[in-house]
Amino acid sequence: MAWVETESLSFTARHDSARARAAELVLDDLEDFRAKLEGIFAQVPGGITVVIHPNEPALALAAPWLPLARAVAAPAGRRYFAGWFARGEIHVLTPEALDRRASDTPGSREALRRSPRHEYAHLVLGANNPSLPPPFTPSTFRRYVRAAWLCEGGAAHFSGQVPHLRAAIVRRLREGGRPSFPPSPRDAPVLGGTVFSLLQREVGTPACVSLAASPVRGGGGPALEHAFQSPVTAIERLWLDYLAGFTAS
């Protein structure tokens, strides 16, 4: 099928001609999301190309860094690597392909349906934090892995995925033992967002935005202490208690 374009105020979708309505829905949702982020971030990029792929092989071919990122992640989080980002563009699956990727656990479909928001959130984070990609090169990919808890966690939090990742979080806690803090690159896709959701609960949205824009030095401890206004050891105890609530409910 021929590839065509569908435009909105801030985005241009590239998709096959049979999926024009799906593209419109994706762009409408992204415009709503961008408007929300515009009120809290200093830089909210527009003029973004959204490439909507009909299946997994097409996505992997267009986003060669994606399989590498999945390989780093723990099994509980690999399902939710369902898109990718680059300078000025994001790559996502069609809503139907996202639904096929979902598991039968509660929240999986809802989390995956937010994948376009997740990938656009990466562009917003990168626009406000020079230490984060895009662009991607071997050196910036290594930097992305080191800061994965912030990069993936911030995208999961601001895109609204974290409440829908409960089953994945519980699986990780049951299968993987006590997590490190901040979450390791392996745990970042599932547990990174919980750092931000805890910060949201304890301090509020401005602190989450400030953390997302902070350079990651020393493993992230200084940025976390500034955001929470607390020593990192105390934050870790609070976070572990917060995670215990996922398995208790």
Image (cartoon, helix red, strand yellow):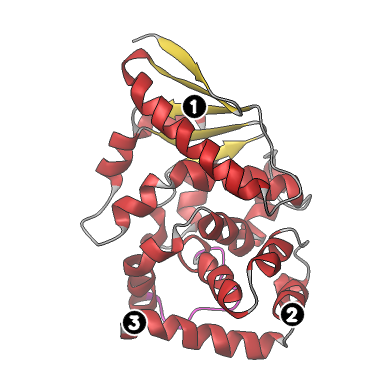
Q: Position of residue 37 (x, y in %)?
A: 62, 49
The reply to whether the C-beta atoms of the residues labelled 1 and 3 are less than 8 Å apart is no
Q: Which of the 4 image quadrants contains residue 76?
A: bottom left
Q: Residues within 10 Å of mark 3 (few under 14, many from 20)?
A: some
Question: In the image, is residue 71 part of the stretch drawn in magenta?
Answer: no
Q: Which residue appears at 41% of the width and 85% of the height? A: 244
On-image quarter of the N terminus: top left
**What kind of residue is marked 3?**
Thr
Residue highlighted by disc 3: 247
Residue highlighted by disc 2: 225
Magenta stretch secondary structure, dominant: loop
Q: Which residues are magenta?
A: 176-186
Q: Earlier in the sequence, mark 1 or mark 3?
A: 1
User: How many angstroms separate mark 3 from mark 2 (CA)?
Assistant: 26 Å
Marker disc for residue 127: none
Residue highlighted by disc 1: 51
207 and 181: which one is in front?
207
